[in-house]
Image (cartoon, rainbow, N blue to C red):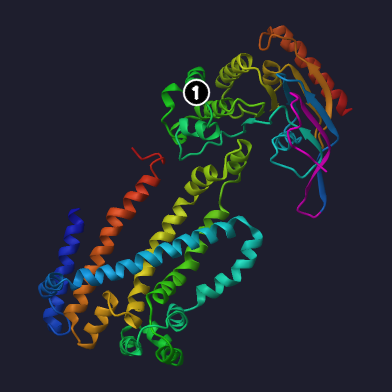
Amino acid sequence: MGARLLSLVLLLAAWYAGSQLAGARLLPDPQAVATAIIDEARSGALAFNLGATLARVAVAFVIAMALGSVIGLIMGRSRVADRLGDPWLIVLLNLPALVIIVLAYVWAGLTETAAIAAVALNKLPIATVTVREGARSLDRIIVLAYVWAGLTETAAIAAVALNKLPIATVTVREGARSLDRALDDMAQVFRMGAWTRMRHVILPQLAPYLAAAARSGLSLVWKIVLIVELLGRPNGVGFEIGVAFQLFDVTRILAYALAFIAVMLAIETFLVQPLERHVARWRPQPA
Amino acid sequence: MNDTSPAGVHNRLDVSIKQKSFRAASGGKLKVLGELAFSLAGGEVAALVGPSGCGKTTLLRIVAGLDRDFDGRVALPAHGTLGMVFQEPRLLPWRTVEQNVRLAAPQASDAGLDALFQTLGLAAHRDHYPGELSLGLARRVALARAFAVEPDLLLLDEPFVSLDAALAARLRDELAELVNSRPVTTLLVTHDVDEAIGLADRLLLLSVSPARVLAEVPVARPRGAHTADELATMRAEIARRINQAHL
């Protein structure tokens, strides 16, 4: 605990020193960022944007995990399903996130105004270097999005879920492949019903794989949600960061980033870790 | 060409196998069971005795309905409710002792389970997880689970293997007591002649692979009440028959 605190203090000190060196315009000091967070919180914008982003993260995460788990379980248990699904999986895994996002906007959204698409295009450069390079080669598709499509919530969520889906599928498939045949036989001999088998025999064996898929999934999903918001949503943390970038408002960028990191830390501490402890309660503890 | 469905309301176990082969890695077929037939009357305890690797476990898996790829026919007694004790305890590590038993036997009464746990010395361990149990205790849980379903047929696959001799003997006595107090048609697989004599009404001696029945040896009742002399005589007799067959 002491070491952790010291490490945090050192980080703040390094930040402060850095801002003195680089100047407040490039890197505002911690106090300025804290003030910005408080201002945004007072105006209600912080809660509103965090809420919008979290809602998208939650919906996309649930869809991707549920579908990914079911498909992964089927592919891990059935050789035919595995052979049929594997090429699709490889295609999806290697399709860049940006392509999926843009295509989803093109195909699924037809209602909102092109002005929003224009804003989305303006914000494009802030995406990470990889994404930006991908974006350049995709100018044409983005222009199509601009011409044909509004950018709907469904498209945004579908894009994120589709990005996460193949990874959840692959992880759960590994788990399903390693299911214990001996316990299967036991369940069959004792004529356990399908629900009992799923809940008491199969799911506990998949728990570590589901946890791994959920962990990696959560971090992937929220990063992609930010890009989705940057490209085509009128609210959310990604949208705010995009606006702040255009105004070169580094303080606001940091304020939103830190606030969001705090929320994700809270989810990890109060949701993910207690759940993991509950699922692992049967493992003998080191005394 | 096979059938493991429970047939009518008869209490016998009828096993009649023409042959069972596995596909070998080299592409050929490996015959593990030869022509083999036996029946168990209701409440009878029979032991399949044979050398390691002769196909005993394969035979038991066929009777249990876990392996349907064979030529022949298996008719289970009555409703075909099975209780099975595998070579390893095969408990669900993430469920407690009591949950393990109840998941297999959802219809078991509280009083019935109390008595069963009492008999097997598990009363103090109901809320423990299998990882917290010794192998001996875990095997008792596996026994409790098999009896809790009140099976029409009890299948025991070397249930005391890899326990030390004293513990195995004690568990054997407890099992004999359970089988005496709740008569159930039982098929026991073992390579241990003493174990077979101690528990069974009848011994079925199996040959080396591909297995067939060499001889049937009845064991005089009461179960488990043989003198050392009687045991020695029987053991000699069984050894003689097995050797005869090898000649």
Give the farthest residue toward the front. Answer: A111
Left or right for B183, reference B103: right
Neighbours of disc 1 within 10 Å: few (<14), some (14-19), many (20+): many
Q: Which residues are magenta?
A: B1-27
- Type of the residue with mark 1: Leu
Q: Position of residue A189 (x, y in %)?
A: 63, 37
Q: Position of residue A214 (x, y in %)?
A: 41, 60
Left or right for A114, reference B157: left
Vertical placement of residue A200 versus B11, above or below: below
Q: Position of residue B134 (x, y in %)?
A: 48, 29
* Residue B11 shown in magenta: yes
Vertical placement of residue B85 versus B194, above or below: below
Tell which of B42 and B245 is nearer to you: B42
- In terms of secondary structure, where does tag 1 sit? helix
The residue at the point 60 percent across, 55 percent down is: A77
Give the farthest residue toward the right. Answer: B247
Left or right for A202, reference B125: right
Quadrant position of residue A57: bottom left
Q: How many labels sit on residues?
A: 1
Image quarter in which the C terminus of chain B is found: top right
Q: Chain of mark 1?
A: B
Vertical placement of residue B36 versus A279, above or below: above
* Residue A38 shown in magenta: no
Vertical placement of residue B49 versus A131, above or below: above
The residue at the point 62 percent across, 33 percent down is: B87
Q: Position of residue A261 (x, y in %)?
A: 25, 67
The residue at the point 20 percent across, 87 percent down is: A248
Quadrant position of residue B218: top right
Residue linked to disc 1:
B113
Image quarter in which the N terminus of chain B is found: top right
The residue at the point 42 percent across, 83 percent down is: A110
